[in-house]
Amino acid sequence: MDDRGGSFVAVRRISQGLDRSNTCHSSSAEFVTGSTAWLGRGLSCVCAQRRESDARPSFDLTPAQEECLQRLQNRIDIPYDGSIPEHQDALRALWSAAFPEEELHGLISEQWKNMGWQGKDPSTDFRGGGFISLENLLFFARNFPVLPDTFFAFLLDPNSPRKSFQDLLRKQEGDRSVWEYPFAVAGVNITFMLIQMLDLEAENDSAFDLLYCITFKMMDQQWLSMRASYMDFNTVMKSTRRQLEKELLLEDIMRLEDVPSYKLLTR
């Protein structure tokens, strides 16, 4: 945190020489979800390869920054394991945050499809994203939720968090297509894209999570502006990645709150 309460983040390595073609690499790492049969090729992950000639600026990190970076790396390395009580509790907490008035009947339930998981068992969709992708969704739900007095809070303070999470979950913003992207699966894809795209140096533990929220809103805005349907998901993800790179590489970006798309979370 800086003296303005911001979230510092430095992009240690961004691919400067992205392949801008529409060709998706065919390695198994591209497929984040347990199965892409539901949407065919529409949810293969966008993972542009870096070239050895790409610029890779280095940063001298303080011991505190090194510690935060190591904690982030440790989080990324944890796979989702449905047998671990902490992971089960996080999944239940996500349901409660998303549907506070609806009781969850079990960790394996047809209800999960209402959140945009591909089947009745969300654990099958975490391959590639790991436990951090669940943590990202839960962070988004808890920090940018919808509350009964949200509208009135916004009238009093236009900068107060509105209902970003619920807007995306329920597709309440903009002129939506008939065939929408599945919310939860898209969230896992965004986590995986950020892990593949960036090496982050953070001043606090929530920097990656906040970047995730910004990127999710950015993706949804790209979706709406392109009038996309579910078969356009890859194209939208590529466009989101390009836009995120442009914004993070702006010279005056010192905090995540300075990223132009941060305002999407608070409007």
Image: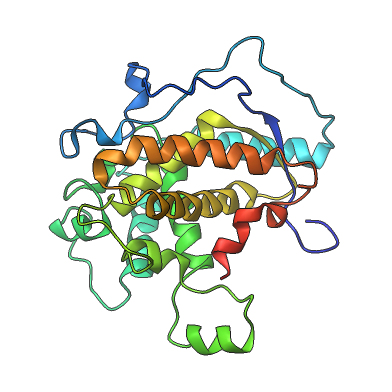
The single residue placed furthest to the front in the displayed view is: 226
In this rendering, position of residue 260 left or right of residue 175: right
Q: Residue 197, image x and y in percent?
A: 55, 30
Q: How many marks?
A: 0
In this rendering, position of residue 262 left or right of residue 131: right
Asked where in the image residue 185 lies, by quadrant, the reply is top left
Residue sitting at x 54%, y 36% = 242
The single residue placed furthest to the top in the displayed view is: 52
Asked where in the image residue 64 lies, by quadrant, the reply is top right
Q: State the residue in front, 228 or 217.
A: 228
Q: Residue 208, image x and y in percent?
A: 60, 46
Q: Residue 7, image x and y in percent?
A: 72, 54
In this rendering, position of residue 185 left or right of residue 267: left
Image color mode: rainbow
The quadrant in which the N terminus is found is bottom right
Residue sitting at x 44%, y 42% = 190
In this rendering, position of residue 205 left or right of residue 185: right
The quadrant in which the C terminus is found is bottom right
Is 150 situated above or below 34? below
Is 85 situated above or below 233? below
Q: State the residue in front, 215 or 61.
A: 215
Residue 203 appears in the figure: yes
Is 47 situated above or below 247? above
Q: State the residue in front, 85 or 195.
A: 195
Residue sitting at x 47%, y 51% = 216
Q: Residue 30, image x and y in percent?
A: 36, 25
Residue 126 appears in the figure: no
